[in-house]
Image (cartoon, rainbow, N blue to C red):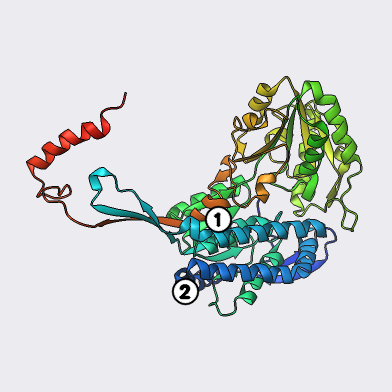
Amino acid sequence: MTSTDTKPADHDTALTSVNPATGEVIGTHVIADDAAVAAAVAKARAAAATWGALSFDERRTHLLRWSSKLVQKSEEFCALIHAENGKPLDDAFLELMLALEHISWAAKNAKKVLGPKRVSPGALMSNFSARLEQRPLGVVGVIGPWNYPVYTPNGSIAYALAAGNTVVFKPSEYSTGIGNFLADAFAEANRELPEGVFSTINGYGATGAALVRSDVDKIAFTGSTATGKRIMAAAAERLTPVLLECGGKDAVIVAADADIKAAADAVAWGATANSGQTCAGVERVYVDRSVREEFVAEVKRILTDIKPGSGDKAAYGPMTMPSQIDIVRRHIDDALKNGGTAVLGGPESVKAPFIEPVVLVDVDENSEAVAEETFGPTITIRTVDGVDEAVELANNSKYGLSSAVYSKKNGLDIARRLRVGATSVNSVLAFAAIPGLPFGGVGDSGIGRIHGEPGLREFTRPHSIAVQRFTVPGMALLSYSRTDSTMKLLRKLVPFLHGRHK
């Protein structure tokens, strides 16, 4: 995922949103300075008293009202996503649909996941009852990306709200209107709530930095690894916990027993959908030598007819962030310079703001096209001699976000060997559409998880409570009144409880 830190030098107070395909101005937004960010966080802090005091059922009602409002306004919202982000209308609707699924899951499962739990006190503390309760953190700051400007930040926003927190959201400068629409729909659906339950602040990297330095209780960030590291360092000043989703270089393994047509179809889509601007999209493929020729030919056949554009017939849209185009071009050039072969496309495929599909085979593993996140509609395919080599190469990356495996018989076994946060077997990206599955990575792909039960717990703090129900004469273990006879009894009891295992 690329950084959202680019700031034109002459734009100090206003942010202009443009259509990435045409350059047409969509809207202008006031940039939030440090004072405005602090004010937004203070308003969220005040609102947290009301929102956090609601029951899980009450918050569920408000979140589902928000979902319904987004459905009612879906045509308008998808048109805005298409205009400001560039993706086709159908893709915009699919993104919204997935976000709605996650709002629903978080709203409906928060009570079960986060409600009070009884805990066994153990034999030595049997005169106590024990319970674990989850408390909201308070105010959560969310810094969102531009590539999936609804679905991705929603993984933090909806789950933080369901857990009882208020949210201050800083959308990417490339999807500011989309982020504001999301928050406005929440407010419109829940007019009786105080201001500040879910609000936005607009701006460039400086606004995001101000949010990190502010009085928030957690920062959830999606973006580049470099920016994530800077956020983590800045958050350390106040010991503010962070959740970081920092992209990846996701691999697909195509085993000898794979359904080649299905694998090629999934890889072709996973590599180029959304113009390749998908942190969990396909960037590397390791294919068994016995099926290599068939697989490469099928991927090439599919992608030959796939074209970007801004019209109704376009398979995918423009590159949303202009500076990313140069990175994609550099990776293509570096791959070819380091022994790779382009079986489809090449440097000539870069026709800013659009990039046509590029398929590169047997590229050196040390090249940028293999080692670094490209974030464009390109793919590298390497021939391997078996699953062991494929797993070794797939794991030889500083990233570890997600992956996919194609094998009719051994998909699950292969998946378990991969150093990643998520894997789809005989599909790509399926985990992202299943709300109950957590999403996040290891290594340079980040820290923490969104979605699922872990995604709800990310936005709470556990509170352990032990209640003494009755006293046991002579058994006051946590007291100076403890007797010698008590200790003699314990010395007999402990070996019986814990010393008989062989």
Horizontal placement of 117 versus 127: left or right?
right
Disc number at residue 220?
Answer: 1
Q: Foreground residue, 96 or 218?
A: 96
Q: Is residue 331 left or right of residue 461?
A: right
Which residue is denoted by mark 2 in the rendering?
50
Under mark 1, the amino acid is Ala
| Residue 225 appears anywhere in the view | yes
Q: Nearer the viewer, residue 143 or 392?
A: 392
User: Is 354 left, or right, of 128 in this rendering?
Assistant: right
Q: Mark 1 and mark 2: span between their CA atoms?
A: 22 Å
Query: Where does the C terminus fall, quadrant-wise?
Result: top left
Q: Residue at x 85, y 25 (%)?
A: 293
Q: Secondary structure at mark 2?
A: helix
In this view, 321 is above or below 41: above
- The residue sitting at 69% across, 56% down in the picture is 98
Residues packed near mark 2 inside 10 Å, few (<14), some (14 to 19) or many (20 plus): some
432 and 187: which one is in front? Answer: 432
Q: Position of residue 322 (x, y in %)?
A: 77, 53
Q: Quadrant of residue 300?
A: top right
User: What residue is drawn where x is 61% and y is 46%?
Assistant: 246
The percent position of residue 137, horizontal first and vertical second, equals 45, 61
Does label 1 or label 2 sit earlier along the sequence? 2
Of all residues, the one furthest to the left in this rendering is 484
